[in-house]
């Protein structure tokens, strides 16, 4: 699970706020940076950049977005935010390699050092070493998106007094069948039929939240199902080694 469940929350309103000025813009920028740093880090590391340098590159990239106010020009009608960030970080790495090595240790700090403490352990789980930078970015983005949608559902269930139901059944979000119904029903004190309905409702709610999350990053008229399909395909792709 990602460490920041705010990933993509009220996405375009955050982007618009981050492109403004004053305290609201600072808060929005902070939230956006914390939400998106890991896919960016995954991209940079899979470009072959060492961990400390990758941390500085990501920090420098985010600081530059803020300093240049690049977010001011962004809007939903201009397309996918995912594509914007992926292209921007690709260019940033290329410029760094070409000699614009402005990210110095301790400078341009946007994120806390603590954000990166377990970054490489997480990288190995979510974007293995065999991944190329593009695949690593897509995998990390997809996992953040799925986990954020699950967090949305958890919050809804907790708010309605059904936190225990979510915690018991959340594993079913990763399964296609209903093999665990009997055990879940016993743990929750439900009949098997009631438990099957509860699982169906959980999956339906998750699907709704996932659709909201995907739509939040797209421009008007873009196909959210096609976008989700691309992200899920990135998770399903085998590495070149066949692993």
Image (cartoon, rainbow, N blue to C red):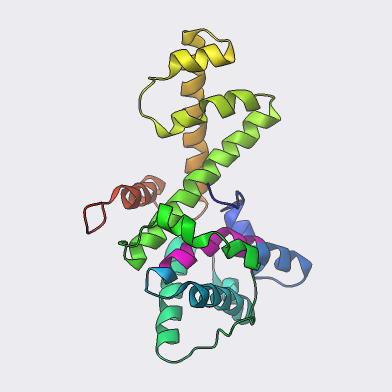
Q: Position of residue 173 (x, y in %)?
A: 45, 32
Residue at point 65% right, 72% down?
110
Quarter of the rendering containing residue 123:
bottom left
75 vs 174, nearest the viewer: 174
Q: Position of residue 68 (x, y in %)?
A: 60, 81
Quarter of the rendering containing residue 69:
bottom right
Q: Measured along the vertical axis of the image, is residue 104 above or below residue 9?
A: below
Horizontal side of 125 relative to 1 (left or right) equals left
Q: Measured along the vertical axis of the image, is residue 184 above or below residue 217?
A: above
Q: Is residue 220 visible?
A: no
Q: Is residue 184 visible?
A: yes
Magenta stretch, overall SS = helix
Q: Is residue 33 magenta?
A: yes
Residue at point 42% right, 67% down?
43
Quarter of the rendering containing residue 117:
bottom right
Residue at point 41% right, 62% down?
137
Horizontal side of 73 relative to 219 (left or right) equals right
Horizontal side of 12 relative to 54 (left or right) equals right
Q: Position of residue 105 (x, y in %)?
A: 60, 82
Image: magenta residue range: 31-43
């Amino acid at each position: 699970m990602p460490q920041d469940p705010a990933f993509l929350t009220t996405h375009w309103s955050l982007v618009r706020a981050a492109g403004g000025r004053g305290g609201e813009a600072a808060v929005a920028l902070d939230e956006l940076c914390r939400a998106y740093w890991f896919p960016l880090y995954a991209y940079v590391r899979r470009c072959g950049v060492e961990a400390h340098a990758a941390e500085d590159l990501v920090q420098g990239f985010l600081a530059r977005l803020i300093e240049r106010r690049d977010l001011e020009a962004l809007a939903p009608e201009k397309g996918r935010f995912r594509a914007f960030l992926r292209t921007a970080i690709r260019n940033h790495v290329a410029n760094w390699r070409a000699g614009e090595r402005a990210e110095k240790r301790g400078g341009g700090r946007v994120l806390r050092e603590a954000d990166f403490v377990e970054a490489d352990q997480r990288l190995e789980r979510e974007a293995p070493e065999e991944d190329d930078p593009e695949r690593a970015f897509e995998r990390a983005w997809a996992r953040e998106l799925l986990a954020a949608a699950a967090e949305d559902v958890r919050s809804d269930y907790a708010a309605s007094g059904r936190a225990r139901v979510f915690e018991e059944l959340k594993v079913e979000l990763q399964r296609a069948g209903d093999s665990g119904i009997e055990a879940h029903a016993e743990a929750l004190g439900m009949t098997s039929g009631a438990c099957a309905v509860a699982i169906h409702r959980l999956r339906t709610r998750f699907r709704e939240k996932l659709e909201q999350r995907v739509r939040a990053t797209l421009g008007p008229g873009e196909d959210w199902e096609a976008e989700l399909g691309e992200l899920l395909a990135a998770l399903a792709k085998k590495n070149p080694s066949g692993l």
